[in-house]
Image: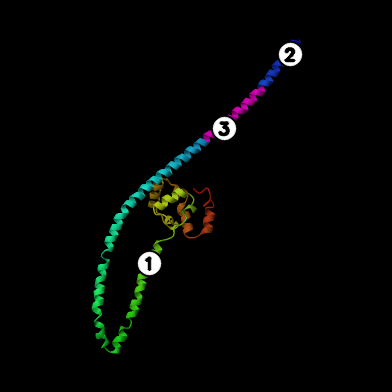
Amino acid sequence: MSTFFYMLLAFVVGILVGWFIWGRLRGELDSVRGDLDRTRSERDRLRADSDRLKGELDASGRARADLESRLRDTPSAKAGADKAATPAPSALMPTTSAAAKAGPAKPAAAKKPAATKTAAAPKPAAKAAAPKKAAAPAAKKAAATGKADNLRRLIGIGPVNERLLKGQGVTTYAQIAAWTAADVKRIEEVLNFDGRIAREKWIEQAKLLAAGDEAEFARQFPTAGTASNS
């Protein structure tokens, strides 16, 4: 009877020990499975980042090739501008000769009555008007050389996209606000995007910033200019 009791006790103890060991092993197995799932998700995220960086690198390569081709074409454009500017001195020759011919006529005009002198008096006013004509090209030049805006304030434009946009000559909010459908298609081909400009509302953001409506911009796009803007 005692032998049977000890055997039964040993059997119960074995079951309890086995259950305890199995519970610990099962917990460790679940932990390993969780770590494996986290590792897989991290691997997928790294792959997505790698694909995105590869796309930006390809876009940078295309932009670089475009800039190099423009730089190669620059000397020929300068040569054409020099040729166009060469006839300018000769255009001044008729004016100089006309002034030389008009010079000797002044003594003859002095013999005329005083009424003739009063009629010739408005000539200095015509000379004073000349600086105004010269000031017009300077005003146009000042308007053409606008200050570049901080394009990274727009959601979706990070350092890489800002550099690519500047390579295409896009430096202000007003330029982006005036984009047409053809402009959007051309820029998306350069930046290797597919509908991203419309999804992130680049043009709507640029219109508000170009108009100086900071309050409405902050209301509609509260995440603009933050760390998530990339």
> Which SS class for mark 3?
helix
* Residue ID for mark 1: 138
Q: Residue at x 30, y 56 (%)?
A: 77
17 relative to 159 in the view: left or right:
right
Q: Within the magenta stretch, is there residue 22?
A: yes
Report which quarter residue 148 is drawn in.
Answer: bottom left
99 relative to 41 in the view: left or right:
left
* Residue ID for mark 2: 6
Q: Residue at x 46, y 59 (%)?
A: 210
Q: Residue at x 74, y 10 (%)?
A: 3
User: Three-letter amino acid code at disc 2?
Assistant: Tyr
Q: Distance between the Cα atoms at labels 3 and 1?
A: 68 Å
Q: Nearer the viewer, mark 1 or mark 2?
A: 1
Mark with earlier residue (3, 1): 3
Q: Quadrant of the N terminus?
A: top right
Name the disc covering residue 72, or none. none
- Report the front residue among 159 and 78: 78
